[in-house]
């Protein structure tokens, strides 16, 4: 059984989904479903202890440190380029076992950075800080 829902997606996010769909030769809907499945774990796996520890440390950080964490939590341009290269190769011809391992490792690093960044931004927002500049750097 499939449930249906209408979701209003910001233009910048929709544009990124369209680009990914074009690159993977899939529909925007398929890309959105994959992105949601990646973002929302369908298993009850516990959070890795290193991630839980970092998130816990954010609770007591001052706002300037939270701001810096939000700015710094991302993959390096080199890592992003390598990850994109591996994803393109996966779609074209598949990956070797070593390449799959590297891609999975980079994906975990990306997810960790994204989670830490989101949590730091949420805490700043809770503290009444304007995070518009941080949000713009995400969609730029």
Image: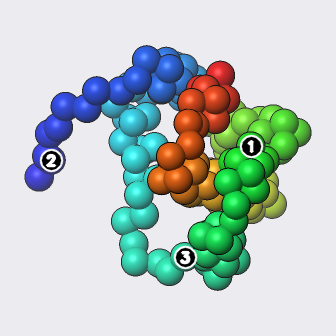
Q: Which residue is mark 2?
A: 2
Q: Is residue 105 above or below residue 136?
A: below
Residue 71 shows up from this direction: yes
Which residue is at the front of the view, 85 or 129? 129
Question: Left or right of 132: which side holds 39?
Answer: left
Colour treatment of the image: rainbow
Q: Using the image, tell me which numbered label, if any, was put on residue 71.
A: 1
Q: Is residue 40 above or below residue 58?
A: above
The crowding category of the residue bearing disc 2, from other C-alpha atoms within 10 Å (few below 14, some 14 to 19, many at least 20), is few
- Between marks 1 and 3 in the image, the one whose residue lies nearer the viewer: 1
- Between marks 3 and 2 in the image, the one whose residue lies nearer the viewer: 3
Name the N-terminal-most of marks 1 and 3: 3
Q: Which residue is mark 3?
A: 47
- Picture coordinates of residue 64, whole percent (x, y): 74, 51
Q: Is residue 98 above or below residue 94?
A: below
Residue, x 39% and y 36% (percent of image)? 32
Residue, x 65% and y 22% (percent of image)? 140
């Amino acid at each position: 059984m499939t449930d249906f829902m209408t979701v209003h997606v910001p233009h910048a996010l929709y544009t990124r989904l369209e680009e990914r769909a074009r690159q993977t030769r899939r529909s925007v809907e398929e890309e959105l479903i994959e992105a949601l499945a990646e973002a929302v774990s369908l298993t009850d796996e516990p959070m890795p202890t290193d991630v839980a520890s970092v998130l816990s440390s954010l609770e007591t950080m001052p706002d300037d440190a939270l701001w810096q964490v939000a700015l710094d939590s991302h993959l390096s341009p080199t890592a992003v380029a390598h990850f994109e290269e591996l994803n393109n190769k996966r779609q074209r011809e598949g990956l070797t076992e070593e390449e799959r391992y590297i891609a999975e490792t980079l994906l975990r690093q990306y997810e960790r950075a994204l989670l830490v960044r989101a949590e730091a931004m949420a805490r700043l927002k809770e503290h009444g800080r304007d995070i518009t500049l941080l949000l713009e750097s995400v969609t730029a």
